[in-house]
Amino acid sequence: MQATARAQPNIALVKYWGKRDSDRNLPAVDSLSLTLADLHTDMQVRFEDGLAHDELTLNAKPRPDLGARVSRCLDRVAGPGRSRARIDSHSNFPVGAGLASSASSFAALVVAGAAAAGRKASREELARLAGAESGSAARSLYGGIVELVNRDDTIDVGMLCSVDDWDLRVVVAVTDAGPKPVASGDAMELSRRTSPFYGRWIDEQPADMAAARAALTARDLDALGEVAEHNCLKMHSVMWASRPAMVYWNAATVNCLQTVRDLRRGGHGVFFTIDAGPQVKAICTPDHEDAVAAALAETAGVREVLRSRLGEGARLLGEAA
Ligand code: PMV
């Protein structure tokens, strides 16, 4: 009745922002992302008959404040009549800071939870279960470059390129490792209700997805960067125009954008993206990685630079027992 799974965060290049059905957590738009290799969350789920309620620890600290979403997700995976569980989560990167820890956490949770409950579920089914709690988590079930596409009353998730198809590198400039002020789920609802740009954001997503897919097929980093930066800044414009305004950036975030643009002007193939937090993710090919990491590390306000290759989808560590 116990199992451990590992999952990595994913970084969206064409972003998910907004829900078409908030009860079922169905996204309003399709999205496309890179699954990372070097940042990870390991999650152990152990069902125990004698427990009165679920007990969650995160990096060895009890976190009852985060327990409701975890319990709800386990109910979907193992059924509401399940035994209560001890859930131990370990991440090797800052959690809740805009580094997609909810994606790696819920992807690892569904894989470990299903195995511990003895439920045989397809990857597709696990992706939908993870997506029901965190939209982006559905993408972390798959490795490499992944797309999430809306279907009538569900989502389809699949790999577009494997880790061997295109060797991309992600350099993350951490500008503030503290927790973000507003959870992305709440912020995207605020955008839907109040941002004058929300409708336009939804309408233009199919064109951005098509441009990103074409750039992937051609392995064209410049074209991929052009649409990814546009899509990222458009998502943040939607947030900035919400009432109240949602601004996740700090001064160092803007400094990092400038660094990436300067690198590009200097001939380096690199582009940026930013999620619901102040960190900047720079995407490049291996030959530019050292220069990108060095320039971001020297940028004013950057606290730490993390580097990653592309990685595999969520998986069990060892056998369930
Ligand atoms: O899956 P959530 O609810 O954490 O939302 C993720 C939203 C973004 O990271 C900003 C974009 C994305 O597609 O991952």
Image (cartoon, rainbow, N blue to C red):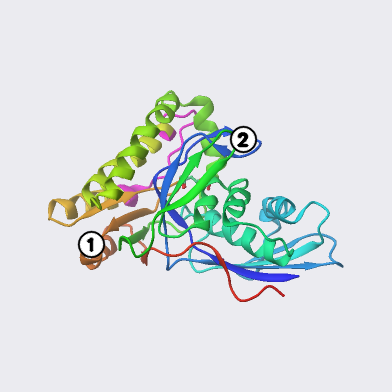
Q: Is residue 253 magenta?
A: yes
Please name whichever residue, 313 or 185, is drawn nearer the observer in this view of the structure. 313
Residue where numbered disc 2 is placed: 22
Residue 107 badge: none
Q: What residue do we see at 54% from left, 52% from top?
A: 137
Residue where numbered disc 1 is placed: 295
Dot 2 or dot 1: first in sequence order is: 2
Image position, residue 154 (x, y; %): 59, 39
Tell me the magenta residue range. Answer: 239-254
Q: Is residue 61 above or below residue 29?
A: below
The answer to whether 64 appears left or right of 241 in the picture is right
Please name whichever residue, 257 or 206, is drawn nearer the observer in this view of the structure. 206
Does any portion of residue 181 appear in the rendered image? no
Q: Is residue 30 magenta?
A: no
The answer to whether 308 appears left or right of 82 in the picture is left
Q: Mark 2 touching mark 1, by CB under 8 A?
A: no
Image position, residue 8 (x, y; %): 49, 62
Judged by depth in the image, the label closer to the viewer, 2 or 1, is 2
Q: Quadrant of residue 174?
A: bottom left
Mark 1, secondary structure of its residue: helix
Quadrant where the N terminus lies? Answer: bottom right
